[in-house]
Amino acid sequence: MLKNEVDLNKTGTVFNIQRFSVNDGPGIRTIVFLKGCPLSCYWCSNPESQNINKELLFNLSNCTGCHKCEKNCEHDAIDFNNINRIDRDRCISCGNCAENCYPGALVISGKDMNVKEVLLEINKDSSQFRRSNGGVTLSGGEPLLQNEFALEILKGCKQMGVHTTIETTGYVNKNILENVLPWVDLVLLDIKTIDEEKHKKYVGASNKIILKNAKLISDLAKSMIVRVPVIPEFNCDSKSIENIAKFSKDLNHVKELHLLPYHRLGLNKYTCLGKKYLMKDNINTPNEEIMLKFKKIVQKIGLKCNIGAH
């Protein structure tokens, strides 16, 4: 018997709540993005999600040069001689400069919230969930890095009668999965490659835990979909897709695989964070012909296949 008491005071760090999503689970969904990820994919479109702590972003195109940020920074972390404006060795991401930056050149990514506050935001969309058979998706980063916070949100959603989905890398302790999965209706699991050496190079960690957890999740989850980001020079070839599809076909409760073509929509965020984007400039989104070829490979192996937005 599951204990459904919800700790409404449990706190965590949220970097976005996105409404009216149709790509991250059934129906119309509200996505709660939690900060923190143990991986560092070259192509990550949410680099602000990787650090579990709050971070300051600077967008030069919005800056009017008013110097209010400099005047309000108590740590001398604003440097107008620096094109990225922020001395990140001094900056503690307190947010004072961002609060006084009316053009929005400086923005804090990450907000401390408790479970009650998150559930109140979710409840605003309850009518949309009912009309569309939608619900809530926890994403990140890796939402299970803040596993206690995530668990209480999921429990609260189930208390409200809301369908729950998590998007996960699978790079977590198995005990966390065992605690969280009873409260999850659908798991969207990223499997990026079966090749361990490629995974280490481009993702920053071995995939052994992920592949092992894929089997555990498939045994425990009510429903599971494997999602594959299709990345040129990494896994954008027939053999890579075939290997992932064969592995997925052998998992329990997995009847569907989604192919998510690479895009560069998060590129500007790296500049705003003062980080280097590791993907080459000449790498582009796989075209429709390539994606349809991969879709046929997945279908031939016996899985339903969708081409979605990454």
Image (tube, rainbow, N blue to C red):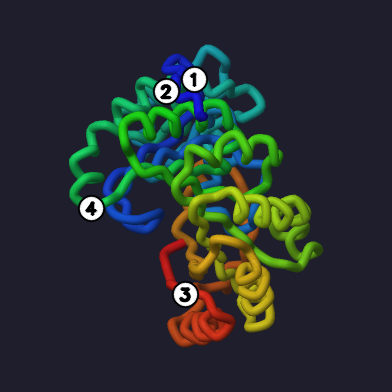
Q: Position of residue 266 (x, y in %)?
A: 48, 54
Nearer the observer, disc 3 or disc 1?
A: 3
Name which of mark 2 and mark 1 comes first in the sequence: 1
Q: Residue at x 44, y 26 (%)?
A: 111
Residue where numbered disc 1 is placed: 11
Could you say whether the residue bearing mark 3 is in a helix, strand or loop?
A: strand
Furthest residue in direction right, as rendered: 197
Q: Which of the two labelled residues, at mark 4 and mark 1, occupies the earlier sequence position?
A: 1
Q: What's the distance in space between the residues labelled 2 and 4, CA to CA?
A: 24 Å
SS category of the residue bearing label 1: strand
Q: Earlier in the sequence, mark 4 or mark 3?
A: 4
The type of residue carrying mark 3 is Lys
Query: In front: mark 4 or mark 1?
Result: 4
Name the residue tied to disc 3.
304
Q: CA distance from mark 3 to mark 1?
A: 38 Å
- The percent position of residue 43, horizontal first and vertical second, equals 58, 59
Q: Would you name the residue on which mark 4 appears? A: 132
User: Looking at the image, do the residues carrying marks 3 and 1 touch, with CB atoms under 8 Å apart?
Assistant: no
Q: Residues within 10 Å of mark 1 (few under 14, many from 20)?
A: some
- Badge 4 local density, few (<14 within 10 Å), some, or many (20+)? few
Q: What amino acid type is highlighted by mark number 4?
A: Ser
Q: Could you tell me how far apart the alpha carbons at marks 2 and 3 are, in whole angstroms?
A: 36 Å
